[in-house]
Amino acid sequence: MIIDGKKVALSLLEELETKIKALEKKPGLAVILANDDYSSKIYVDSKEKHSIALGIKSCVYRFDKTITQGKLIQLIHELNENPEINGILVQLPLYSHLNEKEILELINPKKDVDGFHPVNVGKLYAGLNPYAVCCTPKGIVKLLKAYSIEIEGKDVLVIGRSNIVGKPVASLLINENATVTLAHSKTKNLKNHCKRADIIISATGHPNLVTSDMVKKGAVVIDVGISRQGCGRLIGDVDFEKVKDIASFITPVPGGVGPMTIACLMENTYELYLLQNKR
Ligand code: GUN
């Protein structure tokens, strides 16, 4: 069965739109784009479009290469203090002259809509409630639940150890009582790990890394990879055409995990608004 991320995301967005309409004020999301990467520009445009459609106030700051670390630090301080802004997102990567770690640590953890601040990373790791959970991992767990795919007790293989997807999704799934293996570029015998897994989550950006001979019959395959082919077409990490005949559930690229990431970003903005406007 092909998992329809667009459909699940749409129903989450519709629920959110209703809840946001009922609020006293508009939630505010600030997005900072300080790189010249084409994909990042597309993602940021899409975040802006979705915010506006839902009634979220969107403030996008687009910078060219002349932006300095000092200016960016000042902007983060201003956004932390601005009561109209409930979520702050710094699109990664940043230009190479900027210090990403310093910037992320300056964001108020209660406005950290991406869940990248060490306080939120630590809360997630410790099984405590983070103020916000990273959007892609949160979206993956929502997709599994939307299709009633059992997580508890399952052998899950996560491929890729990034701070954005691999590590946080492993933590989330451990909190959901899965048995999680985290594989990465130095893992030996990836195929053996894959063959054992009930659920495979691949987040590497290497096209065709997961092939049909690596997947157990009936396994669930979640493809988080996004690579742009020469012709501009997007493809994932998984050999979709062949693996779809072996897997019980599989996500396509595009139209699988991607739409859930955006929907969860909108949900995190709404939830941070509620947190900051608690009476
Ligand atoms: N770059 C790639 N994915 C993401 C994401 O989910 N959030 C941010 N801030 N930057 C990214």
Image: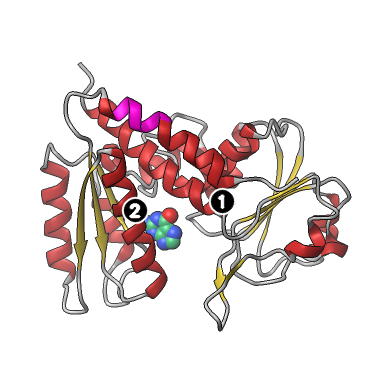
Q: Is residue 138 visible?
A: no
**What secondary structure is marked by label 2?**
helix
Q: Is residue 239 left or right of residue 68?
A: right
Q: Say which amino acid is labelled 1.
A: Val
**Numbered mark located on residue 47 in the image:** 2
Above or below — where is 105 with respect to 67? above
Q: Is residue 92 left or right of residue 186?
A: left
Q: Is residue 123 left or right of residue 250?
A: left
Residue at the far top: name it. 279
Q: Quadrant of residue 233?
A: bottom right
**What secondary structure is marked by label 1?**
helix
x and y percentages locating residue 272 in the rendered image: 30, 33
x and y percentages locating residue 204 in the rendered image: 60, 65
Q: Say which amino acid is labelled 2.
A: Lys
Residue at coordinates 36% horizontally, 57% vertically from top-left? 46
Above or below — where is 56 with respect to 234? above
x and y percentages locating residue 80 in the rendered image: 17, 44
